[in-house]
Amino acid sequence: MAPSIRLGRIFGIEIGANWSLLFIFALIAWTLATTILPLEVKGQSSVAYWSAGVIGAIAFYVGLLAHELAHAITARRNGVKVSGITLWLFGGVSRLDGEPPNARSEALITAVGPLTSLAVALLALLGAFALAAAGVPALVSDLLFWLGWINLSLAVFNLIPAFPLDGGRLLAAVMWGRRGSRAAGVHSAVRVGRVIAYGMIALGLVEVFLGSVLNGIWIAFLGWFLLSAASAEEAGIVTRALLKSVPVSAAMSSPVIVVPDWLTVDSFLTGVAPQHHVTTYPVHGRTGDLTGVVRLRQALTVPPSQRHERRLSELAVPIADVPTASPNEDLEVVLRRAGESLDKRVLVFDGGQLVGIVSPADLSRLLALRQAQGAARP
Ligand SMILES: [Zn+2]
């Protein structure tokens, strides 16, 4: 989940939000202002209800942010790089680069999230009771009471043992400690999570048939979301396990075809590309230095009428933006650096000499081969 709005930094951690957050924000403010608060505290103006609703929605996201910050800060203390926090439709996600060093760290990084929600819940509930006793307007203490209750639900919901919820990660950490490998731990936790997700989908369908359509659809949708998230988590683990201690040289294509960057798109498409099987071409300038990387698909997007004028240098991804690696480097480490989609490709240099390129096609070919070898092993 990539952030689309940058909100700033807290403790050096980048905080972002996805547009989908606005939907839940509006839903919370609307439910508070039109249903929950008018039921609890009667006879207030609609301005008062709506102000309280908006403040409640903001406080909800502050609580969510506290939960994610707890994960992120603990992760950083345990030697895991944190690339940021994204708030979105289903709450928050801390984006961690890499894996915790051991099962204990994983359990700790995970547990602090729900514990923080629990602490926020207790503070809000105590505050609500104290303020009510002190005689402040009921709208204020009621809002605090709602905030406490929602954070308590958040802590409990997050402890459901299904990926990607904290409960699923905790279960994986426990299994990791018991079975000795993270992949094995995640594998068993994912299986438990899958059963729970199917259970939620079934429960949602039953609710729909019993007449509470909206509630049923929501539960089934959450179940479906947990199901697909579990599969994605498992696929990532399998990929990383398959690529562990595989050198870059095993995946790269070579030799590399380097072409001048002043070629027109037309002469590239008619003169160069038909003679080679590769789809990615590094380009060089007049001095011979590499200036960027051009892909066949990019050249094909240039309209035929412009292919005589436009040059490869205009299309190329600048060389400074292209990730590089050395042939003996661990592929898993390089993928973490370059991003698993490999959308910019990876140039492989050996002693300053360009010796190969790694593309998504190279990677999927290698993965398929490794998978076949793994399956053949007794
Ligand atoms: Zn969490």
Image: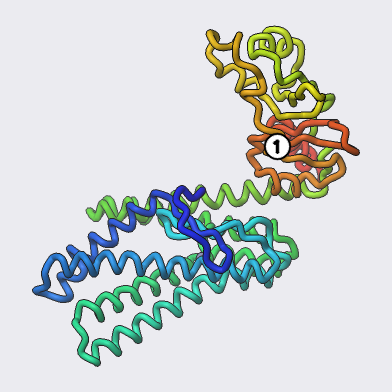
Examine the rendered structure and indicate whether residue 279 appears above or below residue 50.
above
Q: Residue at x 71, y 45 (%)?
A: 335
Give the residue type that dot 1 points to.
Answer: Val
Q: Residue at x 65, y 31 (%)?
A: 317
User: Looking at the image, can residue 161 be seen?
Assistant: no
User: Looking at the image, can residue 257 be seen?
Assistant: yes
Report crowding for label 1: few under 14, some 14 to 19, many 20 or more residues within 10 A (C-alpha).
Answer: some
327 sits left or right of 278 in the view: right
Q: Nearer the viewer, residue 238 or 358?
A: 358
Residue 287, percent from left and from top: 81, 24
Please identify the residue farthest to the bottom as the structure is shown. 134
Please identify the residue farthest to the right as the structure is shown. 351
214 sits left or right of 356 in the view: left
Q: Quadrant of residue 186?
A: bottom right
Q: Is ligand 1 within 8 Å of the beta carbon of the residue shown at mark 1? A: no
Examine the rendered structure and indicate whether residue 71 appears above or below residue 247.
below
300 sits left or right of 275 in the view: left
Residue 44, percent from left and from top: 11, 72
Q: Residue at x 42, y 70 (%)?
A: 63
Please identify the residue farthest to the front as the structure is shown. 287
Residue 293, percent from left and from top: 70, 28
Q: Nearer the viewer, residue 272 or 306?
A: 306
Examine the rendered structure and indicate whether residue 12 appears above or below residue 268.
below
Residue 213, percent from left and from top: 26, 51
In the picture of the structure, the residue carrying the numbered disc 1 is 322
Q: What colour scheme does the image use?
A: rainbow
Examine the rendered structure and indicate whether residue 44 appears above or below residue 161.
below
Q: Please, what secondary structure does the residue beneath circle 1 have?
A: loop
Q: Nearer the viewer, residue 293 or 114?
A: 293
Q: Residue at x 34, y 65 (%)?
A: 58
What number of labels is visible? 1
